Image (tube, helix red, strand yellow):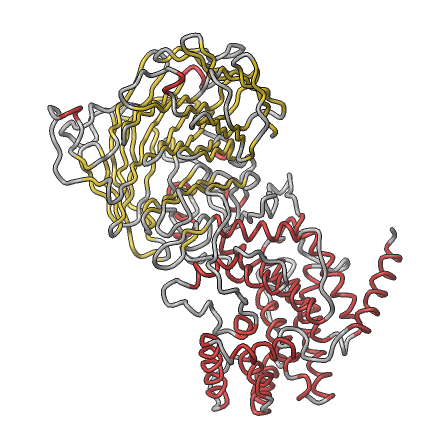
Amino acid sequence: MNVRVIIVLLLSLGNQLMAQHKPHPYLFYTPESIADVKKRLENDTLLNKAWVNMLQSANKALEGKKGNPEILTLAYCMTGEVKYAERAKELLFDWINKDKWDGLDDRTPRWNSGLGTARGCFQTAIIYDGIYNYLTKEERKKIVEAINKLGIEPALNDWMSTNKRIHSLNSMGHNWWSAVVFEAGIASLAIMTEDEQAKTRIEEIMQASREWFSFSGSILENKPSSFDSNGGFYESVNYANFGVSEYLMFRLAYTNALKPISMPYDNLLQKTVDWFIHTSYPNSKRLMSLNFGDSNDFSNGERVTKLMLALGLGKNYYQWYLNEIGLSEGREDLNINTPLGFLYHPKFEQIKASNPLPNAAMYKDMGWATFRDSWKKDATLLGVKSGYTWNHAHADAGSFVLYHKGQYLLIDGGDVSYGLPEYSSYFVRSEAHNVLLFNGTAQDPQDQYHAVKNPGSLHHLIDANNLKYVLADATGPTSRNFLRNYRNFLWLDKVILILDDVKTYETGKFDFLLHFQEKALKKGPDLEISNNDASILFRPLFPETLPLGYPHDFPEKMKLEERQGIKDRNAKVKIPYFALSPAEKSRQEKFLNAIILLDDSNKAVETFVGSSGANGTAARTNLPIIEKLSGENYIGVRIKQNGKITDVFLNLLADGRLMHRNSNIIINGWETDAYILSVTYPENTTMGSLENVNSFFVSNGSYLRKNEKVYFSSLSKVFMNVVFTNQAVEIEANGQPITNISMDINKKPTKLVINKSEKNINYKNNTLQFNLEN
């Protein structure tokens, strides 16, 4: 299709819009929305309170005090009293009498538009549309000319035009593009009754939105896809809420003014709300979210979620998410003290909202993962990031954070104002995150400005009952030093194991960084990290220390160093964090550290016994007993708690040291080639008997055998957890696209569940056979 045909089609669409447009106001403060909210005021006390507050604010603005033009315009639309329209008009003329709304003179070529332009477009569009009937014909003409000159034209010339554009989606196609272009779209909708060209612009902007949502990255600029295929937005929760909601505001105005539409990315938008939910941490106070990158503890997707509901694209469980936000400290009004929040406050049925999303999620394209033990308030949430670094995404490949019992315990470094030197010298760098350093560095500090060529990644998510697993690969971003930089997270009941497998080009010093929120005390072999009544124990296991319970803190083979970081959002305040380092330099190492989750039945106490105490462990209350295991070509741990034992082994032959040979090993009678093997069985039973094994997990393994029994076999290596319960078999697994698996089982299972889906049972000659559908 040539350019002339496209222009003709767009003009045709513009003519159709001319015939379809409604009387003003039609953007947001529509007669329908005003009538609806007036009816709801009869019974809704929260809406009444919000309206009273905003009307009081509008009345104060009449007294000459600085007023909110959106509230004044709403007051006029709600009451019809011209005094509000008159004051709103004064503020509107303040906008249109300016010489310019924005401009960056330090850029070549000069930027004639930015976020200030977006703000001007939105404010003037709201007022102009809302008080349109109060304005004279001459005033309308003057206002339209100014909106075009100061807002729409510089915005679209810089960001969309064919003959003057200076930006591309490759360079600035993130939240700024969304704000500037879509707010110019709202302004174009506002003036389309007076400006013929506006109608064509509107459709051009809507069509351009398809390119914005589908941007898949750039090799030469080292840019990733803006959106993960599962809905995540790599720039952070904070910027996702801003950038996506800017589009949705335009979409809502378009729908109100013209007609509802459907777009090919609508399903992606719904997945984005799911991503906001997965990154949230419900607690008894104020809802928190993962603060990876330039975000903050309390960012969320409230604005996006409400706009999706207003557009009819919402899901029932969005109520659960908004309830969690609304029950936060001092925020019971769900932000309805703003005009748009007031008019488009969601209508929920009087039912108890629930959340059907799974307890774990991975965003493979952007390298984020979340695990939680439940969606209840004050549960435990582990967040992992190993992805991209540029702009608002920090140099944090392989990092993790932990929330527990309502508190943020193991933290991301955070950020400060972009203009402060500490932002670049500390917050965006690897040192501000829970990563491994080699000779004091991990990622290049320039990555945030020039982008990382080889991003980190996450793989092989397993979310199975009491076991959760993900593999983080941080080798790419740290490859100037690291040949291998793999971090395994294995969550087993009350214990989270973090297993680092690292190798470098030369001998040097490794540092395991641990950033914490409030308080950390050394107790025997542990760090007890706490915030109010939430606590965990952090226990180093390998490189091997002296026996647990030894009277010295962090014995001679490991060194614990306290370092100084900077407090999130307060560059003037120094805070401590820890670096855990082997006493000797090396070029290849295995770190195995345990996080023990403490709760009311699983507490640490102050008194510790010496090395002569039982098992050399500190006196505890129902804590898991963790015993280190090691042998030829393996290290591991045995975890005992609540009548069951879990053995975890790391196969040292499976760390890439062998070429053209499989990593075959025998560990305590287990024959396997797995990288990690975990077996759970009841205490006081014969380990290894199939009847006594409750579950087993293999990471990158193709077989597991013992006593001539084949627990499983496949030609290619898989990541798989198998749970046996009352003759039912439940499997979580992933591997190659075609993977056939066989298992020796004495009796035919009554039920087979693979990756949360029940399957037909193929059982013959005491062998269960199935294939993975990846």
> Nearest the camera: 223 or 49?
49
Q: Could you tell me residue 407's position as x and y percent?
A: 32, 51
Is 668 displayed left or right of 250 in the figure? left
Q: Quadrant of residue 763?
A: top right
Q: Could you tell me residue 751's position as x and y percent?
A: 51, 28
Q: Could you tell me residue 719's position as x and y percent?
A: 50, 26
Number of numbered discs: 0
> Nearest the camera: 771 or 518?
771
Q: Residue at x 49, y 80 (%)?
A: 51
> Nearest the camera: 760 or 147?
760
Q: Residue at x 68, y 59 (%)?
A: 159
Q: Quadrant of residue 509?
A: top left
Q: Could you tell me residue 397's position as x and y percent?
A: 46, 38
Is residue 507 visible to the viewer in this orientation of the structure? Answer: no
The answer to whether residue 692 is above or below residue 222 is: above
The answer to whether residue 160 is above or below residue 378 is: below
Task: State the quadrant of the C terminus.
Answer: top right
Is residue 574 visible to the viewer in this orientation of the structure? Answer: yes
